[in-house]
Image: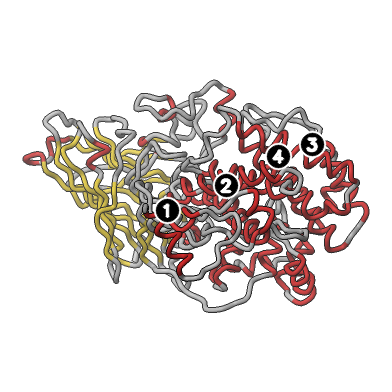
């Protein structure tokens, strides 16, 4: 008897009921896999789908019971009421817009798909609450337009996924009010333009992938499958089963600490579809099959908050945007709903006057539902010194909510050939007194680079990607040796972390310098409440000629005898070189940028300390630099 049979036998022996359609191997879905991941529960067969699917609609995130609570909260809860008022304003603006057209920009239909999702998310929930005929007509018009497109652009499957979620929401939330012809058109489109192309070779690489595509595309296909489950249960069951098997490929990236390798804004994107998927499965089947309980997934909300500095700017590593939005974050609101922890509810942002809401999330309708389900339980606080391990490990030191200096430091290890990765191991950002003194250049527009013929997405050692200021090590606050590019596939790990009054973290940088240094470690030390010290211990190779220490800044730089004074917004920061002695800084002006295609950042500069290798006796040396505000 094999292990699966034993498990099945034990279940039967204990008299436990096995739901129809559940196979014997379901018992083992929580077992760790060879790569450290674990499976989600996956009982999906046609029989299971038919017997378990919620018999009433709506069933995508919204249910009749949840809707009853939502309507009550709109009347009684200031946060829910205010957010709904902003959605009604948005609905009026949407009704003024022409229907969407098939508009491919570069290699993407994505902007059209996202606009459709935004429109359906808002209009559908507003119609369910207020039943305005003009809102329903707009939904009908938009559905007929997009469902008559030639396709949903399967060559870039994010486009299909977001469109599928948009149409599925409309079908599920307002389908019973739509003309039968429109409803049939929409369901056929979900099958023919949404799901079926995902079975064509070349279109489904995301199914088991390790980045945001997995989360977005599997989420879109699950939404479409639930919406057409009664029309084509075989296709729906097969597609949901495929996705439940594939989703762990992305979820395992959060381990072991909740750090999202692609950065804070891609956390928003990927995680938004994962929490949507969890909610859809719960509302449709009464279970999310272990998605929300996946190791480190819930902890990732802490990562997202910790990556936001007091200024509102992100620690914007990888292809991360620069700043958090001014609207309340509905993805964090899902975490608030799941945990009852108000730490994740950006209440002040949700309560701002609704006429100041601009650019609501395209998942705003879902966010309203999550807000309405929040019930406060215990609150918690986040650490002032935090280390998150994983493929792209980071460390963060903060001053806390009551810190008058608004201290914020974030640094990282990692490697270049991750999804949306940069050659930025050892880089950091630093804020003090309301000024971001050390910056990361962040992301830049993909389409303009692609249209120029730039090879943005290949990540080989000699690939063009790394020549960009935003991508190569020359555009980040780290060490560069002999002007060479980092080893793209090498990972710099955070090998030591200490919290307490003087927190510190050490990164082993040796792998990225292979062939140029024998070893290198970078230590970040928060030695006071107004400073950060960076210590680089290196051992050179016989061939090593020069080491360049650098930061990126938009401040004015005034050289001094042992470093520089940085000035910005009426504030000052001292850059002091402790070791080696008798060195000066050089300032490289990067506005205008070195290459025409580089991202333009006003007043951008690279502050360098250039160190000849011969200064290090026996090839061993310490570079020690301190950044501090005047006491």
- Tell me if I can see residue 482 in this picture: yes
Under circle 4, the secondary element is helix
Q: Which residue is mark 3?
A: 147
- Tally the numbered discs: 4
Name the mark nearer the viewer: 3 or 2.
Answer: 2
Under circle 1, the secondary element is loop
The residue furthest right is 133
Gap in angstroms between the C-alphas marked 3 and 2: 25 Å
Give the numbered dot on residue 113: 4
Gap in angstroms between the C-alphas marked 2 and 1: 15 Å
Counting from the top left corner in percent of width and height, residue 373 is at: 67, 70
Name the mark nearer the viewer: 4 or 3.
Answer: 3
Q: Are marks 3 and 2 in contact (CB under 8 Å)?
A: no
Name the mark nearer the viewer: 2 or 4.
Answer: 2
3 or 2: tag closer to the N-terminus? 3
Counting from the top left corner in percent of width and height, residue 573 is at: 37, 56
Under circle 3, the secondary element is helix
2 or 4: tag closer to the N-terminus? 4
Q: Which residue is mark 2?
A: 241
- Callout 1: 10 Å neighbours few (<14), some, many (20+)? many
2 or 1: tag closer to the N-terminus? 1
Q: Are marks 2 and 1 in contact (CB under 8 Å)?
A: no
Gap in angstroms between the C-alphas marked 1 and 4: 32 Å
Residue depicted at x 75% and y 60%: 55
Q: Is residue 91 left or right of residue 376?
A: right
User: Which part of the image, by quadrant, shows the C terminus?
Assistant: bottom left
Give the numbered dot on residue 38: 1
Gap in angstroms between the C-alphas marked 2 and 4: 25 Å
């Amino acid at each position: 008897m094999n292990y699966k049979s034993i498990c099945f036998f034990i279940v039967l022996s204990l008299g436990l009921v096995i739901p129809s359609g559940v196979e014997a191997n379901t018992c083992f879905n929580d077992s760790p896999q060879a790569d450290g991941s674990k499976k989600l529960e996956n009982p999906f067969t046609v029989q299971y789908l038919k017997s378990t699917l919620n018999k009433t609609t709506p069933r995508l995130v919204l249910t009749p019971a949840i809707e009853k609570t939502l309507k009550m909260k709109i009347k009684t809860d200031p946060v829910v009421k205010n957010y709904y008022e902003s959605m009604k304003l948005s609905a009026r603006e949407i009704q003024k817009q022409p229907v969407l057209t098939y508009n491919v920009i570069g290699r993407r239909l994505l902007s059209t798909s996202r606009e459709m999702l935004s429109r359906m998310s808002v209009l559908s929930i507003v119609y369910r609450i207020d039943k305005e005929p003009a809102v329903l007509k707009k939904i009908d018009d938009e559905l007929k337009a997009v469902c008559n497109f030639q396709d949903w652009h399967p060559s870039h499957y994010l486009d299909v996924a977001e469109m599928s979620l948009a149409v599925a929401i409309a079908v599920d939330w307002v389908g019973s009010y739509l003309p039968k012809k429109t409803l049939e058109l929409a369901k056929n489109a979900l099958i023919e333009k949404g799901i079926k192309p995902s079975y064509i070779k070349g279109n489904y690489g995301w199914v088991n992938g390790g980045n945001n595509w997995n989360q977005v595309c599997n989420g879109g296909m699950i939404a479409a499958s639930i919406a057409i489950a009664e029309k084509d249960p075989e296709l729906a069951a097969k597609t949901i089963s495929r996705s439940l098997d594939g989703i762990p490929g992305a979820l395992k990236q959060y381990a072991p600490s909740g750090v999202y390798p692609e950065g804070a804004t891609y956390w928003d994107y990927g995680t938004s579809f994962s929490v949507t998927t969890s909610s859809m499965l719960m509302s449709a089947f009464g279970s999310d099959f272990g998605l929300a309980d996946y190791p480190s997934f819930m902890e990732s909300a802490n990562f997202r908050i910790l990556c936001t500095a007091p200024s509102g700017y992100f620690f914007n590593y990888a292809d991360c945007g620069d700043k958090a939005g001014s609207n309340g974050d509905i993805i964090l609101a899902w975490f608030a709903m799941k945990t009852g922890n108000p730490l994740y509810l950006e209440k002040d942002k949700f309560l701002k006057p609704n006429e100041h809401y601009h650019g609501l999330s395209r998942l705003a309708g879902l966010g309203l539902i999550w807000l309405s389900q929040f019930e406060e339980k215990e609150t918690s606080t986040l650490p002032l010194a935090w280390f998150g391990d994983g493929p792209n490990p980071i460390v963060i030191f903060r001053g806390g909510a009551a810190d008058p200096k608004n201290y914020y430091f974030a640094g990282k290890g990692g490697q270049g050939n991750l999804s949306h990765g940069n050659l930025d191991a050892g880089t950091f950002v630093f804020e003090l007194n309301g000024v971001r003194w050390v910056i990361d250049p962040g992301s830049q527009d993909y389409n303009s680079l692609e249209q120029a013929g730039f090879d943005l997405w290949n990540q080989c050692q000699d690939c063009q990607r790394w020549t960009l200021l935003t991508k190569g090590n020359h555009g980040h606050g780290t060490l560069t040796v002999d002007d060479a590019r980092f080893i793209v596939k090498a990972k710099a790990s955070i090998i030591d972390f200490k919290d307490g009054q003087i927190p510190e973290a050490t990164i082993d940088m040796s792998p990225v310098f292979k062939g140029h240094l024998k070893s290198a470690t970078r230590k970040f030390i928060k030695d006071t409440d107004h400073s950060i010290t960076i210590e680089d211990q290196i051992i050179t190779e016989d061939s090593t000629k020069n080491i360049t220490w650098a930061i990126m800044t938009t401040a004015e730089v005034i050289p001094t005898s042992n470093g520089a004074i940085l000035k910005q917004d009426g504030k000052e920061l001292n850059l002091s070189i402790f070791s080696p002695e008798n060195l000066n800084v050089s300032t490289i002006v990067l506005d205008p940028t070195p290459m025409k295609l580089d991202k333009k950042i006003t007043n951008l500069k690279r502050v360098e300390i250039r160190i000849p290798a011969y200064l290090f006796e026996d090839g061993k040396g310490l570079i020690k630099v301190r950044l501090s505000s005047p006491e």
